[in-house]
Amino acid sequence: MIGLSSYAGVMESLTNAAEEQQPSSPLTNSWSIKQESSKNQKTKGVGGFVLVHAGAGYHSESKAKEYKHVCKRACQRAVDQLKAGALAVEAVAAALVELEDSPFTNAGMGSNLNLLGEIECDASIMDGKSLHYGAVGAISGIKNPVLVAKRLLSEAQKGKLSAGRIPPCFLVGRGAHDWAVSHGIPPCPSEKMATKFSLSAYKRNKRKMELAEKMDTGDQTKKRRQSSENENGSACLDTVGAVVVDLEGNVAAAVSSGGLAMKHSGRVGQAAHYGCGCWAENACNMNPYSTAVSTSGCGEHLIRTMLARECSAAMQSEDAHQALLEAMQNKFISSPFLASEDRVLGGVIVLRCCRCVEAQPSQNIQGILVEFLWSHTTESMCVGYMSAQDSKAKVSFLINVTSKIPRIVGIVILYSPVTPDI
């Protein structure tokens, strides 16, 4: 178990290893750090941890600085909530708002435009304590879709509506927008949500589509499409997400996305689907570990494999690192549901934790042992992480040597915020 005194050094060496080490295998690359500490520091009831991602896909190295900054800000927003005593579900929503507000991410502000040149967003959130879930799909005119998803979750927790009606947990399109406005979430004109980056990308993609449609049908068109997919297939698969554990050991997960570039109007990706975009579940009699997962990548691939829930179930195994590697390989890359796909594109961030008590001469010290992992089969993934005791977040920007061979990159972090047993 790692005490607070050793935690900063562990994280620093982990980051350096991730940034400096070159992949040694065409299939898997992994780093793991375990350290024992004989010293335990007393805290003042402040604890918790957050892990965020800016998407699994292709991120331009020229914009790496911006991706790192937004991940750091998202971590800080979540930690501020945790320090104020908020539960995990509140903190994870705060992290997502920061990620959605960035013009560099494909979520909320600056999302990809669809075929009609409009922005339609998906988002979901899950509370591991109550197991409630809220989601919106293809919603327009709302700056922070995750806040609508969170409000759906909280309203559902209040119980049945008038006349015994069941409250909704998943709304789409215009109905989602109107429900959000009626519950105090301010609308935002879609034109204000588009940025110079998303508009230029839309114009560029539209020109490519027009050129492709002029090509003759047959093998030439098929080859052109395959070439285009190889060049740009993962360029816009940058769904954002976060997982959080609070001082009490509650977990939560959230995800938000603008969807695929040039998608058909009304298309809903994995970010809104139950068990596909995110999953969070506190430990119970049957499951010794609390788990939280957030996914990113090609929505259709993630929906057909229900990757978030699959990874959560895998985390009940003793070896979390090996379990995630096997889940990504067997349940995703080699999944029979994706047998017809040439490239399987996706990524996950995963959290699992359990309570542990260490006897001390004067008192019992109760902590939460937390393991964080992330994996991706795409060209790149940017993640950030931070504990409530850290002064600033740490970020890793990982780029695969080649995207032609599916890769899994995993990092295991062991952390135990110790607090006096109350």
Image: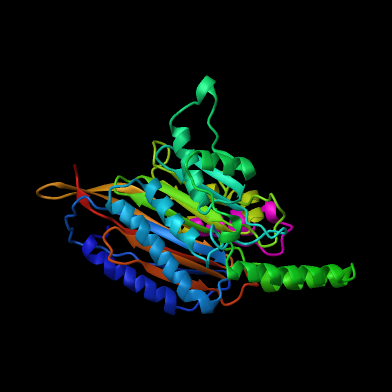
* Highlighted range, magenta: 324-348
Residue lying at 28% horizontally and 63% vertically, measured from the top left: 390
| Residue 314 seen | no
Which residue is depicted at the point 19% across and 54% down?
A: 43
| Quarter of image, res 10 | bottom left
- Residue, x 70% and y 61% (percent of image)? 262
Seen as rendered, the residue at the extreme left is 362
**Colour pattern:** rainbow
Query: Which residue of the protein is positioned furthest toward the top in this rendering?
Result: 163
Quadrant of residue 218 within the rendered picture: bottom right
Judge by depth and name the residue closer to the eye, 48 or 336.
48
Residue 336 falls within the magenta-colored stretch: yes
In the image, 396 versus 142, the foreground residue is 142
- Relative to residue 354, is residue 346 depicted above or below? below
Left or right: 189, with 366 as reference point: right
Q: Is residue 385 positioned above or below 179 on the image?
A: below
- Residue 223 falls inside the magenta stretch: no
- Considering the image in quadrants, where does the C terminus appear? top left
Q: Is residue 300 above or below residue 63?
A: above
Residue 352 is left or right of residue 236, and the answer is: left
